[in-house]
Amino acid sequence: MSTLEIKNLHVSVETKEGSKQILRGVDLTINSGETHAIMGPNGSGKSTLAYSIAGHPKYEITDGEVLLDGENVLEMSVDERARAGMFLAMQYPVEVPGVSVSNFLRTAKTAIDGEAPALRTWVKDVKSAMAQLRMDDSFAERSVNEGFSGGEKKRHEILQLELLKPKFAILDETDSGLDVDALRIVSEGVNRVKDNTDAGILLITHYTRILRYIKPDFVHVFVAGRVAEEGGPELAERLEAEGYDRYLQGATA
Ligand code: ADP
Ligand code: MG
Ligand code: MG
C-alpha cells in the first residue's frame, strides 16, 4: 500500500503584475486503490495543483509538502517522479517531433521500470491496450502529440496510464473536449486501471459528467485554492444538481 500526501500546499505563480498566490493550503491524502475527484469552478487552482505536483517550473511552492510514502516528491526531478510511480498526464504535453508513440511508450516504460520490457509481451500489451481504447494501429507510428486531436490526446494519456502502471495518477480535465463516445471509451480505460491495478487516482474535473462513468470514492470541492468541502460520491451528485454557487459567495479566486 502506498500513500500520496499533499500537506498545506501553498503555490504562487509569476504574472506580469508580480507573484500571485494560487494555492492556499491544500491538504489531501490518497491511498492505493482509491479514486478521488477534485471538482471546482474554473480558476479555482485545480490545474495549478496538478502542475505543481508534476514539477512544472512556472509554479513556485511557497509552503507545504507532497510526500509519496514519506519521500519528498517536490525535491525530485520530473523523471524521478515518474520512476517513483507518479503518473502526471501533463508531464509530456509538448509535441515530440520524430518520436513515435510506440518508441515514446517503450522509452517511458524502460525509464520507469529500470529495464526494457520484454519485447514480445510488450508489443502484445500495447496492441491490446490500443484496441480497447479503439485506437487504430497506425496511431503507434505517429509522432507524439503532433497534430493530435483533443480526443487523441486523451486516449494517448489513458494508453500511457494503462501501460506504465503507476502508483498514483493525476488526470486533469480528462473529460474536456470529448464527445460522449470518446468519454465512455476513456472512462472505461480509467475504470480498467481502477479495477486491475492498485493505482490511486486523482481525477480533476470541472464538470460532473465524467463521474457518471467513473465512480470516485471521495469527492473534494476545490474553491479559491483550497479544499472547501469533502465527501463521498453523493457530493458529486449534489454538485451536479446545485453547481458551485453556494461555495462562491464570499470566496475570492
Ligand atoms: P483551474 O484549473 O481550476 O481552472 P488554474 O489552476 O488553471 O484553475 O488557475 C487558477 C488561477 O491561477 C487562475 O486565476 C489563473 O489565471 C491563474 N494562473 C494559473 N496558471 C497561471 C500562469 N502560468 N500564469 C498566470 N496565471 C496563472
Ligand atoms: Mg484547469
Ligand atoms: Mg483498484
Image (spheres, helix red, strand yellow):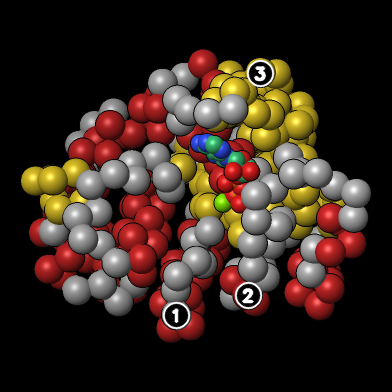
Please indicate whether residue 128 sits to the left or right of residue 205 in the image: left
Assess whether mark 3 and mark 1 are in contact (beta carbons under 8 angstroms): no
The residue wearing badge 1 is: 179
Front position in the image: 22 or 17 = 17
| Mark 2 or mark 1: whose residue is earlier in sequence | 1
Where's residue 6, x and y in %? 69, 31
Q: Note whether 34 is above or below 3 in the view shown.
A: below
Where's residue 47, x and y in %? 57, 45
* Disc number for residue 62: 3
Q: Residue at x 33, y 73 (%)?
A: 132
| Mark 2 or mark 3: whose residue is earlier in sequence | 3
- The residue type indicated by label 1 comes to Asp
Q: Disc 2 to disc 1, how far (Cα)?
A: 11 Å
Please indicate whether residue 203 sits to the left or right of residue 241 in the image: left
Which residue is farthest bottom? 181
- The residue type indicated by label 2 comes to Arg
The residue wearing badge 2 is: 209
Q: Note whether 92 is above or below 9 in the view shown.
A: below
Find numbered disc 1 in the image and state the secondary structure of the residue it sits on. Answer: loop
Where's residue 34, x and y in %? 66, 52
* Disc number for residue 72: none
Q: Residues within 10 Å of mark 1 (few under 14, many from 20)?
A: few
Front position in the image: 123 or 236 = 236
Q: Disc 2 to disc 3, how far (Cα)?
A: 34 Å
Q: Disc 1 to disc 3, how far (Cα)?
A: 38 Å
Find numbered disc 3 in the image and state the secondary structure of the residue it sits on. Answer: strand
Q: Which marked residue is nearer to the observer: mark 2 or mark 3?
A: 3
Residue 34 visible at all: no
Q: Residue at x 41, y 21 (%)?
A: 77
Which residue is farthest front? 17
Q: Residues within 10 Å of mark 2 (few under 14, many from 20)?
A: some
- The residue type indicated by label 3 comes to Thr
